Image (spheres, rainbow, N blue to C red):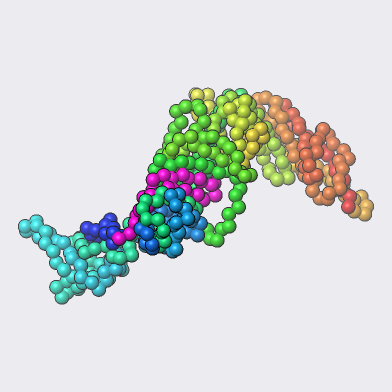
Amino acid sequence: MKSAVIFFALLFSYQFLSSQTTGKRSNVDLTIYNQNLSLIREERTLQLKEGISTVIIPDIPATIDGTSLHFVSLTAPTSVRVLEQNYQYDLVDQNKLLSKYLGKTVEFVRINEETKKEFTVSGTLLSNVGGIVAEVNGKIEINPAGRIVLPSLPEGLIAKPQLEWMVENEKQGEHKTEISYLAGNLSWLCNYVALINKDDNKLDVTGWVTITNNSGTSFKNAGLKLVAGDVNIVREKIDPYQRYGREDMVMAMKSEPQFEQSELFEYKLYSLKRKADINTDETKQMELASGKNVDAKKVFIYDGAKESKVGVYVTFKNEQKAGLGIPLPKGKVRVYKKDNDGKEQFIGEDQIDHTPKDEELKLYLGNAFDIVGERTQKDRRDKGWHVIEETYEIKLRNHKKETVEVLVYEHPGRWREWEILRESDTWEKVDQTTIKFPVKVKQDEEKVITYTIRYEW
């Protein structure tokens, strides 16, 4: 049995709108926030009649927040106002079309197996749940052969989301208008790629903006601005699904930055210096910033109270002399290094927060293989009323071929009043609940650190 194929001649016909004014987009600017939110500003030219009329605004994102829409006639701002707005999103699909024709007569186009010519039979559509059921020539057919032809597009179904306005106008003629609104599922994020040199003291860093458009509509030749910062947004509900589009990598051909950075309230604004096409169901990447030969340092940290292993970090400064020096949006940083064959290998990644210029970044890339740490509480004594003394021992073993420096962090957090009574190595107070021992461990050496702390309360 051949599967039924939906076919109708008037799928994209808008004849039922012939008495209405349709305003096509002539210009568009996008401001995209890194919180799955975008502000869309459009210019459309409308031919408006005097009095009350209906206006159709097509190519609207399926994710529009209708309560955020603002409209103004640039030609005659005080002459036009929107009395009523309807967001129409009952889109055409097979099930909806067939549901509109239940109990009605439809046509089935079939092929005569002998003559190979098409012929048409009429039948009544009875059901479209789990397959097609129709009455043809007085008999019930399940999944009848042929393709279904419908006479017209049922009223209320549309091919794309659109706005329908009831407009009151005092000045007949052409109006240049501006429309702005918020929409979801048009978002951006920043990712970084870093290549560290052989000696682990220089980095090449490139920041990439990734724009994902799942809003349901495309924006051609659009102005583009990106906002970085923690903008407060009231969330009434969370979209339970997310779609992923194809990737379209746009490579920068020049070293000159594509984006110009400026200030916006307490946030950072990045403006693309050219127009761009942001197509629906697409992921687009653009270079935001890059730096060459950025000074870097590899750091080993052992925080035995929190982690059992010695972590390895890379630090660098976001400064202009290295080609950076602009506020860096939050995002994931992936770090690579060339092996002995000159092939780049992935060595770890970390997430950074929004980082102002001239601030230091610290990337946690993983755990050291050849450096081992152990932490033990050796003693605890009650020394009277609300006085406790504790002794800790930290062992570090270095199996690397060179001397390394390890930053050992400890956390006096039992009480706010404390003092170090005895220590084997020099320490620094980082804050009220953190002290640091910078220690060097030679090749194949075991370094032992001890200290005794007293708490009083």
Is 62 placed above or below 434 here? Answer: below
**Which residue is painted at 46% across and 31% down in the image?**
252
- Asked whether the viewer can see residue 12, the reply is yes
Quarter of the image for residue 130 reads bottom left
Main SS class of the magenta portion in the image: strand
Magenta span:
19-48
Percent from the top left, x then y, of residue 10? 24, 58
Q: Quadrant of residue 405?
A: top right
Q: Is residue 374 left or right of residue 242?
A: right
Which is nearer the eye, 309 or 149? 149
> Residue 199 placed where, x, y %?
61, 24
- Tell me, yes or no, if residue 242 can be seen here: no
174 above or below 449?
below
Q: Residue at x 18, y 70 (%)?
A: 123
Asked whether residue 45 is drawn in magenta, I would say yes
Task: Name the foreground residue: 97 vs 201.
Answer: 97
As for residue 233 lying within the magenta part, the answer is: no
The percent coordinates of residue 273 (x first, y second) are 48, 34
Residue 296 horizontal side relative to residue 147, left or right: right
Q: Residue at x 86, y 48 (%)?
A: 417
